Image (tube, rainbow, N blue to C red):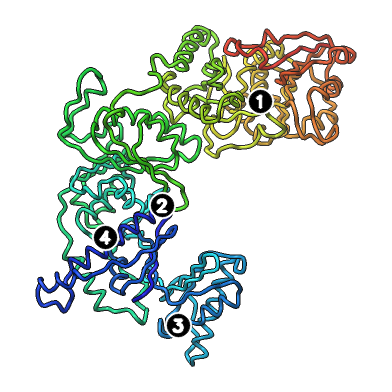
Amino acid sequence: MHKLIVTTSKGLDELLKTEIEQILSTLNIIESPSDAKNSASAEDESDDYELPTLKLQPGQVSFEGTLKDAYQLCLHSRLANRVLLVVAEGTVNSAEELYDVAKEADWPSQFDSYVPFMIQFNGTNNAINNSQFGALKVKDAIVDQFQEAGFERPSVDKLKPGIVIQARLRRDSLHLCIDLSGGSLHKRGYRTDAGEAPLKEHVAAGILMRSGWAQDANSVLLDPMCGSGTIPIEAAMMAANIPPNLDKETWGFEHWNQHEKNIFSEVVAQASKRVKTPNAAIYAYDLSTKVVELAEQNAIRAGVADFITFKQCDVLDAVIAEAPNNTAFNNAENEASEPAVKGYIVSNPPYGERLGEYTSLLPLFDKLGHHLKKHFANWHVSLLSSNQDLLKALKLRYTKSYKLMNGKLECVLMNYQISGQNLEIFESQTDENHEFANRLRKNLKRLKPWIKRSDTNAYRVYDADLPHYNLAIDIYNDWVVVQEYAAPKDVPEEKAKQRLQEALIHIPKVLGIPASKMAVKVRRQNKGKEQYEKVAQKGQRVIVHEHEAQFYINPTDYLDVGLFLDHRDTRLLFKQHCVNKDVLNLFAYTGSVSVHAAKAKAKSVTTVDMSNTYIEWAKDNFSLNKLNGSYQFIQADCLKWLTREHGQYDLMFIDPPSFSNSKRMDDTWDVQRDHVTLLSDARACLKPGGKIFFSNNLRQFKLDQNAVEALGFKVEDITQKTIPEDFKRNQKIHKCWILSL
């Protein structure tokens, strides 16, 4: 007997224990001993079989078993990562004890000195806090033992080892094991290209077991988002009794001196005899033709392509032809007709790990919930996801949930029964009467005439109109940008998340914009250089127009998209003063004011900003508008540049940040504290009779009018003239003055 350790992913360990019990008991009862003379005697002998005591620990199951048991698990386990045979164990509280335990094993009896080996060290404790150090001490003990016994020094080969030794340290307990598997058993070999974030084969097998389908394998199975086909392939192998590693080419025991080839050959032969043609109807659909072709090729390599029906199909069009529509979903007064086909939907849908992906997936999951109720009455549905918020969008009540790991990703498997309450339309509100959707719809209707008059396709349609839906929603051509503000303190975080989710589901429907063209940002108080920091790396460019001008905006990569909509009227008013003038645009951002100035036939336009990214963006905006002339673009700290500038300008546009980490004025910039100094420096560069448009968005800001007038300026507050129609709800969006000499 040998001590065996079988490992798996966390969350599958209890399932693994059950699977091991089934494999050992079933195979030891069904299979006749090699020396049995007749079936009767085989049955009598199998009756004496006693299942070993299995010890369950996180991520592993251990027990005393035979070498044949180990081979059976290597071949048949659909959940195991590795099958390990313990050759030494002991207590380790120091490097010396680690060395001693490793040296107690008879390593020359395990493998020959000419066979290269490697150590995989897992775990640490107070004494061994570095796995590389632990592996080195084990290696030293093995090498020393070989040399002391008179053998050649064995070599270490991490790329192509003949023997892999696993050292498993848990607290002070160490197990040294021969890895019989020869690489992780989840790698079946049929996937050559798994794509992004692939579902591990053993995890796919696990969710099939958790779904209930594996225990009812003659039932219909549908994976409507099959990806590389892992779930339907694993299902077909289950239904056909094909051991997951029947065709595995290399094993970890091939260079192990205690390997029994005849026993392993017998195990393989018996496994081959049990393969059958399955009765199950298995369907694999995906939106991408390329992906479906990939899945089919994987199935061919696995030898199960004939058992699976592959089809290119949108998940929202996925139906099993024999199953009629569920009329109960459409008409609650009518009883649902009994579907001709019942079965299981098991799938690993997109997770939406990043915010933009999550945003685009929400409407899909909302529609998917409707689709399941409509077309799959009385079916079982099992969905694996790392994002429970997406699953909540289904608006289905789950019957059971399981936590498990897919690689390093924490996931949850949700089981649903499409019956009872799940066949009712239990939505908080339908699209027609949902308060947020209604408000957004009303805003669009109200703004429609103004939008037409304003000659722009960039505007705000919602600005926290409903306090409990604390969002700003802007349209930029065919994109929508959603900015989430911090929820009121009296609103629980979970409730705020729920309301955001509701809003994100309704926005594409009401605005008629695909969810893939919806970007979501979290809005916070802008400090210093935060507006310049990237939040994504998509490089998405969209062209919007504003009267005669066009601008590039980036809806995804920055907190601000490249165009301040609240200054639309300010820009147009400024434009009226630019004809034949020398214009300075300070803190210019992406140069939208500069473009309007150039369009107005300004004599010269100077654009200054601290960010090279935005200076280049401004240049692109000029190119987009085919502007050529006396235009300067300067990347510089605006405050420092202004003190050095000796040019003379007729007209300035100054819209500074509220706060900044400038190296002047005590290493900080505060618009309230420092605006008079800024305007004094600007006045030095202003021609007689010149004007400054001065603006900022600090709500508590108060212009020091006395000090500004003392500089020689006439002050005119034009704030109300510069608040566009789509910002009327937010009168404090900015403040603006004309300062004239």
- Rounded to the nearest angstrom, the CA distance separating label 1 from label 3 is 73 Å
Helix, strand or loop under label 4? helix
Q: Position of residue 460 (x, y in %)?
A: 55, 17
| First-in-chain label (4 vs 1) | 4
As drawn, the label of residue 22 is: 4
512 relative position to 563: left or right? left
Pointer 4 and pointer 2: residues touching (CB < 8 Å)? no
Q: Identify which residue, 628 or 598, lies in the foreground.
A: 598
2 vs 1, front mark: 2
| First-in-chain label (2 vs 3) | 2
- Rounded to the nearest angstrom, the CA distance separating label 2 from label 3 is 34 Å
Helix, strand or loop under label 1? loop
Residue at the extreme right of the image, as rendered: 710
- Rounded to the nearest angstrom, the CA distance separating label 2 from label 1 is 54 Å
- Rounded to the nearest angstrom, the CA distance separating label 4 from label 2 is 19 Å
Pointer 4 and pointer 3: residues touching (CB < 8 Å)? no
Residue under numbered circle 1: 591
Query: Looking at numbered disc 1 in the image, what kind of residue is underneath it?
Result: Gly
Q: Is residue 697 visible?
A: yes
